[in-house]
Amino acid sequence: MSPVPASIAWLLVGIVAGLIGAAVMSYPMSRSATGFVPARVATALVTRRRPADVPLPQALAFHGVAGAGAGAVYAVLAAGLDRVLPALGTLPGGVGLPAHLLAAALVAGAVYLVFAVIVFPHAGGRAYEERDTEVQGRWLRASLAFGAALAVTAPALASLLG
């Protein structure tokens, strides 16, 4: 049996880091007045239901899948950026620090923008229209929590493999 190629291992690191990031992101979401509305709205868009009709377990499962997907995007982006950015220190997993940090920031920013610009305005309904600044601020904090968790856990997980 041959060892797992480094690229596949790094992708798995990204996926698991994304799952952990989604779990970490759940804390600020749970403390927010809007709670898990983002997960319900996203699940509702995919399942073509109203957000109020989405059961919380299904929304949480979709939230985890979305976190894993964002983690996979992070891993691919970090590996690609690592080919073009200078390596000012290499992290466990072989990715340079600038590529890692930029990829984590870009993914966290994309997570924020997708919801703040597309999902919430499209499917947030009256609650979003009346409190859009508050909702976007809370979502920004949740997205930053996701990005920070991704930035910390990816190298930590990669060190366990290496």
Image: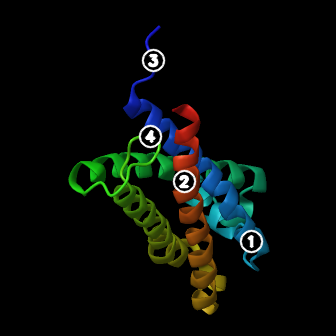
Mark 2 to mark 1 CA distance (whole Å): 19 Å
Front position in the image: 108 or 85: 85
Q: Examine the rendered structure and indicate whether residue 92 appears above or below residue 49.
A: above
Mark 4 to mark 2 CA distance (whole Å): 34 Å
The residue located at (42%, 50%) in the rendering is: 73
Residue 46 tag number: 2
Numbered disc in front, either 3 or 2: 3
Return the disc, 4 or 3, that comes first in the chain's sequence.
3
Q: Residues within 10 Å of mark 2 (few under 14, many from 20)?
A: few
Numbered disc in front, either 2 or 1: 1
Query: Residue 161: percent from the left, percent from the top?
Result: 54, 32
Residue 35 tag number: 1
Q: Secondary structure at mark 3?
A: loop
The residue located at (50%, 76%) in the rendering is: 116
Q: Secondary structure at mark 2?
A: helix
Return the disc, 4 or 1, that comes first in the chain's sequence.
1
Residue 140 tag number: none
Return the disc, 4 or 2, that comes first in the chain's sequence.
2
Mark 4 to mark 3 CA distance (whole Å): 14 Å
**Residue at mark 3:** 3
Q: Residues within 10 Å of mark 1 (few under 14, many from 20)?
A: some
Numbered disc in front, either 4 or 1: 4
Q: Residue at the top extreme?
A: 1
Query: Residue 110: percent from the left, percent from the top?
Result: 43, 66
Q: How many marks?
A: 4
66 lies left or right of 28: left
Query: Residue 78: percent from the left, percent from the top?
Result: 36, 51
Q: Residues within 10 Å of mark 3 (few under 14, many from 20)?
A: few
Q: Is any atom of residue 48 visible in this view?
A: no
